[in-house]
Image: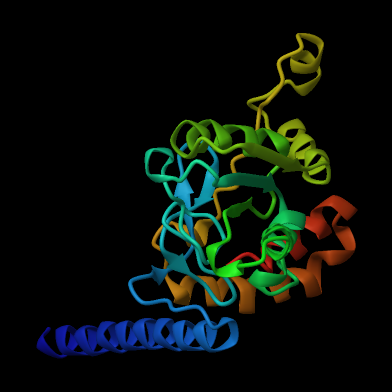
Amino acid sequence: MKKIFISSFIFIFLLACIEFGVRFYIKLENSRNTGINLKGKTYGIMRMDYQLGFTHIANTYNTTRSTNNMGFLNRNDVVLPEQRNIEDVVFIAYGGSTTYSYNLQQDQAWPNLFQKKMCETKKNNKDCKFSVFNGGHIMYSIGHSYKRAERDLPIVKPNYVIIYSGINEYSNYNFLKNNKDFDIDKLIKNEEYGLITKYNYWYLKHNLVLKKLIHFKLLIPLKRKFFSRNLTDTEKLNLDNKNNDD
């Protein structure tokens, strides 16, 4: 019994060392590649959400991204309305992977480039009054973005909102159609819109690097190798998006 206890303790200790070691490595690599100071930020930008399935949370990082004080994919934090200057102009951009821009570096995502371009119109970029906050989430449909905006807008109170959506609507429709809890044809007939698929990815429950490594480095390649022939184009697209999530 004692040997089992000691062996279990050593095993758990090694797993913990690997977990925190990998987190530290990811943090160093992210900071080195992006030039962003990640002090005070914790690992894992995605967390499970009762309404949306998952969402980005504040002051976190993953392999290529980091979030600000409200979970947007930006270097600059959100300044609340009561603390802003009268000349400040705030945008929020919502969308799916095309707004998240998973195949690019964070600063190369179009909302970040838009902010940079707006700032370049001013002589002194350091005192730029434009902020374009990136609210893009992989796999989000316009319904997801709408529900996220319902949370953000009363707090941030932006001057403008940009919605760049249209691709994930078909995926959202297919998932709802295959869900036994929904009669999608009846919902459309009754003009009940705005329903969303909750992408409850199993590896998000405990926010562990090890679970994500198993998912992305083991399960996804196996599924791609043995089951990709039987997947629809939509399912293949979803698989590609999930492989670039966190």
Residue at point 47% right, 31% down?
154
Residue at point 38% right, 70% down?
41
| Number of numbered callouts drawn | 0
Residue at point 39% right, 61% down?
206
Seen in the picture, residue 201 relative to 109 is either above or below; the reply is above
Quarter of the image with the C terminus is bottom right
Seen in the picture, residue 43 relative to 81 is either above or below; the reply is below
User: Is 39 on the left-hand or right-hand side of 27?
Assistant: left
> Which is more toward the observer, 229 or 55?
55
Q: Position of residue 180 (x, y in %)?
A: 67, 29
Q: Which image quadrant is residue 245 in?
A: bottom right
Q: Position of residue 212 (x, y in %)?
A: 53, 71
> Which is more toward the observer, 77 or 244?
77
Quarter of the image with the N terminus is bottom left
Considering every residue shown, the one lying at the far top of the view is 190
Seen in the picture, residue 238 relative to 198 is either above or below; the reply is below
Q: Position of residue 37 (x, y in %)?
A: 44, 79
Residue at point 54% right, 83% down?
35
